[in-house]
């Protein structure tokens, strides 16, 4: 019997040291060169060598200025800052690789849907169908006020808007252009059959988009849809739209149970949309620290952790949670506080392990190294064994591998852990399909699955005349 296979994404962001705060100082870290094309091409080639499904690029378009009501700590410690635009490096990486996918974050709160649909279609063409979209609703006030709003839209309303947003982009990607609309036929003197390209005439509560999609259908039409909703509202959104759900398993003693519980709560929501557990991939993030021996790995872990900067990490957790932690005693316990930013970020440090109460100091230190993901420290065999355990017992379908030091975190993983996963028969030795959706759902599955909500969105009758 074939063993359950796992999927792998490299997890990065177009900034200096996105997920390990303070490690910009580490002598082996080359994050300060992230502005160059070479940095990204090299990373993409490393991941393709390891047969990764995709490079997942996180993104925020704001500054972490909740802590102390200032951007000081974020700027001094390069906390996801400078924040370069990730859209612009994709084609360089795509040109230097053949199969690696790119799961690119785009905000449904700040990018107009008509524009986003065009960008992702263009990228899907440029990559031959290797594009995914990590749909986010965004959480930083500094994004809202610099992108034209007076303040952040409330948490649940961001998701309500995003629901309508998705309707708009499905109409553009799936319905505006019929198959065969692009003729390129000199004899008929027609490049496009205009009767087969429809304006979508969308008019809703939040968006009015009358026109036709600006780009002809790409291999996947709709990019592979990822989402990381963790709140009740967020997981309902994910159950309807996501083909891959990004999550965190931060509680090491209990991570597999935590994942099972996450999936148990997700299943009835999936059913509501005519979907099953098999229609969605669950992908937790992990940090891996690999060594030749267990002692060597532990030593490396301690050394890496010694670079974590408390102030910078506090800026990150304050930005994620929307709570200014400079106002609290660091030795007091993290309490469950209602927030308009990421609700689940605080749950990570309150509800996951009943036997461990986190102080604010501990939570900040942990967050600064892992962002609330599980840290797996050990030999390649031990890391592969733990990933298999999470996949089988926690029912995870794959992992986002976070970087601590670039390029060595992912290079080490590809050189040493990937062969162990292959030896265990739980990871591909080569790509089978060409597009990103095929990597996840098998050769031939280039388009959204038949039971996906995106197919059911209809154009208004008058739009079709
Ligand atoms: C692995 C992972 C990656 C994420 N990447 C981003 C990102 O790049 N940009 C962003 O604005 N939010 C990102 N988020 C936040 C989510 O989009 C979402 O806001 C968060 O999980 C909270 O969901 P909730 O509001 O439903 O609790 C990420 C979350 C997770 C777990």
Image (spheres, rainbow, N blue to C red):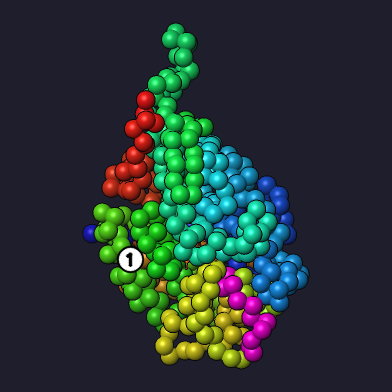
Q: Helix or strand or loop: what does disc 1 sit on?
A: helix
Q: Looking at the image, how many numbered discs can be counted on the residues?
A: 1
Q: Nearer the viewer, residue 307 or 358?
A: 358
Please indicate, yes or no, whether residue 66 appears anywhere in the rendered image. yes
Q: Nearer the viewer, residue 397 or 208?
A: 208
Task: Please indicate whether residue 314 sits to the left or right of residue 224 in the image.
Answer: right
From what the image shows, is residue 246 above or below residue 214?
A: below
The question of residue 436 being in magenta is answered with no
Q: Quadrant of residue 82?
A: bottom right
Q: Residue at point 37% right, 65% down?
A: 396
Q: Is residue 274 above or below residue 380?
A: above
Disc 1 residue crowd, few under 14, some 14–19, many 20+, Cα 10 Å = some
Where residue 142 sits, quadrant-wise, is: bottom right
Region rendered in magenta: 320-330
Residue drawn 31% across the image and 43% down it: 456
Asked whether, in this view, residue 257 is left or right of residue 338, the answer is left
- Does residue 316 appear left or right of residue 423 in this picture? right
**Residue drawn at point x = 44 percent, y = 73 percent:** 249
Foreground residue among 280 and 386:
280
The residue pinned by badge 1 equals 266
Q: What residue is shown at x 59% (from left), y 41% (from top)?
A: 91
Q: Position of residue 179 (x, y in %)?
A: 37, 28
Residue 465 point in image, percent of width and height: 37, 25
């Amino acid at each position: 019997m074939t063993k359950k296979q796992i999927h792998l994404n490299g997890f990065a962001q177009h900034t200096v040291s996105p997920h390990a705060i303070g490690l910009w100082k580490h002598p082996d870290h080359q994050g300060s060169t992230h502005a160059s094309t070479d940095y990204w091409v090299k990373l993409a080639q490393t991941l393709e060598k390891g047969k990764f499904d995709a490079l997942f690029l996180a993104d925020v378009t704001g500054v972490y200025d909740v802590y102390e009501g200032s951007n000081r700590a974020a700027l001094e410690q390069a906390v996801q800052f400078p924040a370069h635009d990730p859209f612009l490096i994709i084609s360089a990486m795509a040109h230097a690789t053949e199969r690696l996918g790119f799961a690119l974050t785009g905000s449904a709160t700040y990018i107009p849907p008509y524009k986003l649909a065009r960008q992702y279609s263009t990228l899907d063409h440029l990559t031959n169908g290797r594009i995914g979209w990590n749909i986010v609703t965004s959480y930083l006030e500094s994004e809202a006020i610099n992108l034209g709003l007076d303040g952040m839209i409330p948490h649940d309303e961001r998701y309500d808007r995003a629901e309508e947003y998705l309707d708009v982009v499905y109409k553009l990607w799936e319905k505006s252009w019929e198959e065969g609309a692009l003729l390129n036929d000199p004899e008929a003197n027609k490049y496009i059959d205009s009767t087969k390209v429809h304006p979508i005439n969308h008019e809703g509560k939040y968006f009015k988009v009358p026109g036709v999609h600006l780009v002809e259908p790409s291999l996947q039409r709709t990019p592979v849809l990822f989402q990381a909703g963790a709140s009740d509202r967020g997981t309902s959104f994910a159950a309807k739209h996501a083909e891959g759900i990004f999550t965190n398993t931060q509680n090491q003693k209990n991570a597999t149970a935590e994942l099972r519980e996450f999936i148990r709560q997700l299943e009835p929501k999936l059913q509501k949309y005519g979907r099953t557990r098999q229609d969605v991939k669950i992908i937790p993030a992990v940090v891996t620290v690999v060594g030749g021996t267990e002692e060597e790995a532990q030593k490396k872990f301690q050394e890496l952790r010694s670079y974590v900067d408390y102030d910078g990490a506090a800026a990150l957790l304050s930005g994620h949670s929307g709570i200014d932690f400079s106002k609290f005693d660091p030795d007091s316990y993290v309490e469950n506080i209602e927030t308009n930013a990421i609700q689940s970020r605080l749950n990570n440090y309150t509800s996951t392990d009943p036997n461990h109460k986190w102080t604010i100091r501990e939570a900040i230190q942990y967050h600064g190294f892992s962002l609330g993901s599980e840290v797996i420290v050990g030999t390649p065999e031990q890391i592969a064994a733990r990933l298999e355990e999470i996949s089988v017992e926690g029912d995870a379908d794959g992992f986002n591998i976070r970087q601590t030091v670039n390029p060595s975190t992912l290079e080490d993983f590809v050189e040493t852990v990937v062969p162990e996963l292959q030896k265990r028969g739980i990871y591909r030795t080569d790509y089978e399909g060409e597009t990103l959706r095929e990597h996840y759902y098998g050769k031939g599955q280039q388009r959204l699955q038949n039971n996906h909500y995106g197919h059911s969105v209809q154009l208004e009758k008058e739009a079709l005349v």
